[in-house]
Amino acid sequence: MDREILESVGIDYAEAEERFSGSTELFEKFLEEIATMNVIASLQKSLTDGDIINAFRVAHTLKGNFGNLSIKPLYEVVSPLVEALRSENILEAQKLYIELEKEYVIVTEGIKKAMK
């Protein structure tokens, strides 16, 4: 994968490389999964359905995944979304989801470009 492209969309490659103990293959495999599977779709459905409990569970999992993969832009948007859901503020969570969706498109397009 093209490291420069990944870094240009906000992925801290060096931090992730350290977190994965130098296993860039494993790190890049997880990035490919983020880029090729719509990992935020179930969050969108839960928010649309007003299912705060499931939305919180999904958002919290995404927060961990984005943090572990050092995908800073997604982590920074999903973190306040988790807190909005924790306080059962569905309207704020839905607003933050729109930001997450925008960042998700930018990041996943960058990952796909880096994969070529």
Image (cartoon, helix red, strand yellow):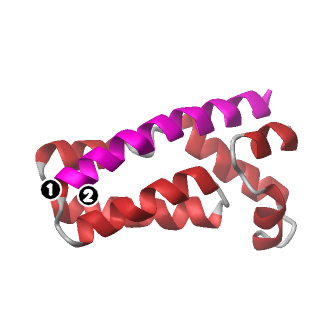
Indicate the position of residue 34 as horizontal and vertical percent values.
57, 45
| Amino acid type for the residue under numbered disc 2 | Ala
Helix, strand or loop for disc 2: helix
Image position of 69 with respect to 83: above or below: above
Query: Residue 114's quadrant in the figure?
Result: top right
Q: Looking at the image, which is closer to me, 69 or 24?
A: 69
Indicate the position of residue 56 as horizontal and vertical percent values.
28, 64
| Amino acid type for the residue under numbered disc 1 | Asp
Q: Are marks 1 and 2 in contact (CB under 8 Å)?
A: yes
Q: Looking at the image, which is closer to me, 25 or 40?
A: 40
Label 1 and label 2: CA atoms lie apart by 6 Å
Indicate the position of residue 8 as horizontal and vertical percent values.
76, 40
Image position of 55 with respect to 2: above or below: below
Could you tell me how many numbered marks the image carries? 2
Image point (76%, 63%), residue name = 16
Residue 79: image tag: none
| Residue receiving disc 2 | 55
Residue 51: image tag: 1
Magenta region: which residues? 91-116
Whether residue 16 is visible to the viewer of this picture, yes or no, is yes
Residue 24 relative to residue 67: left or right: right
Q: Looking at the image, which is closer to me, 104 or 33?
A: 104
